[in-house]
Amino acid sequence: MSEKTLTRHFVDHRRVKLVAGSGGKGACSFHSEPRKEWGGPDGGNGGDGGSVIIKADRFVKSLAHVVPVYKGEDGESGGNKNCYGRNGRPTYISVPLGTIVKEQGKTIADLSEHGQEYLAVFGGTGGKGNRFFLSNENRAPMTATSGMEGQERVLQLELRTMAHAGLVGFPNSGKSSLLRAISNARPAVAAYPFTTLNPHVGIVKYRDHEQVAVADIPGIICGAHLNRGLGISFLRHIERCRFLLFVLDLSTPEPWTQLQHLRYELDQYEPGLSQRPQAIIANKIDLPEARENLQTLRSHVTERVIPVSALTGQNTEELILHLRELYDGFLQVDSSGRLTWW
Ligand SMILES: Nc1nc2c(ncn2[C@@H]2O[C@H](COP(=O)(O)OP(=O)(O)OP(=O)(O)O)[C@@H](O)[C@H]2O)c(=O)[nH]1
Ligand SMILES: [Mg+2]
């Protein structure tokens, strides 16, 4: 599948209506000779309706296949000879890891582990057959109830890419080129802004088999929080990143002002987001004008600046090593000793 096709089919939010299955009807029947000792009511209960369950699946990468309405399977009606109706089977909606389930804007589930499930709507209970109503007072009940309706809900699904580090930068600063240079990911690269429309995650592999996931997201411009460019809604994809890699195009005049703008836009999305542990990547160091800007950039910022060329691969080792330092530093901070990221 070409990059363009992938782009078109990537969906990171969906609104879904879920209706669980209704319970089956209880049966009303008698075996022969009612009112005699050996006769009597034998209508079985209806089966319960099937629930609808949202399940995280690491092989699913987008919400594109999620349809607007899901209807759970209804329970079967009960039958004579006290036969119970079959329960409706549960309906599963497979979603990518990192999917948040929201109801009226409030988060109600966060599916971040493979196989994790959220039972979104319960199926209706099956109706009772007339056998259920048999009592000493009433030896020939004629009552059978219908099953209950399944629960109904409208939910929003939102995908938040899960990566340890997020690449943040202006369009054309070389984020995708950098991801290609340091990882196995192959996002599109082109000399026009907003080439990247969807997040891509690349895995940086180390000799000791440790793996660090890095997310490339669309470029941000001044006023993105006012919906300029592609806006900032896709910043949801770096919300979970533990550290940020600001990618600056060092060949542009005053690249440090880019950094200020980026931080401002990040904080508009979520106050304090720009303060995550970070490194500044000064890209395009292969260009002469970039080399001139490097010293001035260093004098403008206190954070570590790593000059690289995503195009030639120059100094990408330093970036890869620093990424590992950030990653190891985070693991030490996590006093629980569990390698939990999200
Ligand atoms: N000379 C030079 N050009 C680079 C370097 N890195 C990227 N480029 C070029 O810059 C242009 C943009 O690169 P991309 O990697 O697509 O930039 P991006 O930041 O992902 O852009 P958007 O997806 O639009 O946000 C391409 O023409 C790249 O070939 C570099 O280190 N040196
Ligand atoms: Mg890109």
Image: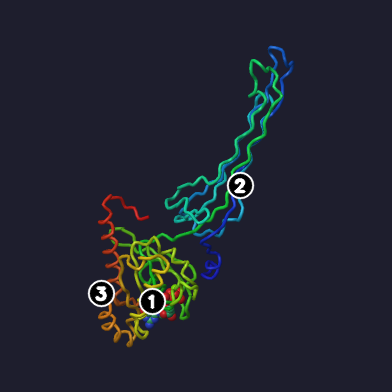
Residue matched to label 3:
302
To which residue does mark 2 refer?
19
| Amino acid type shown at disc 3 | Thr
Amino acid type of disc 2?
Val
Disc 1 crowd rating (10 Å Cα; few below 14, some 14-19, many 20+) is: some
Quadrant of the rendering where the N terminus is positioned? bottom right
Q: Quadrant of ligand 2?
A: bottom left
Three-letter code, disc 1: His
Distance from label 1 to label 3 (Cα)? 16 Å
Relative to 170, does residue 338 appear above or below in the rendering? above
Which residue in the structure is indicated by mark 1? 261
Question: Alpha-carbon neighbours of circle 2 within 10 Å: few (<14), some, or many (≥20)?
Answer: many
Camera-side mark, 2 or 1? 1
Give the Cα distance between marks 3 and 2: 54 Å
Left or right relative to 181: residue 84: right
Task: Tell whether circle 3 marks a residue whose Cβ is less than 8 angstroms from ligand 1.
Answer: no
In the image, residue 161 sits, relative to residue 138, either above or below, namely: below
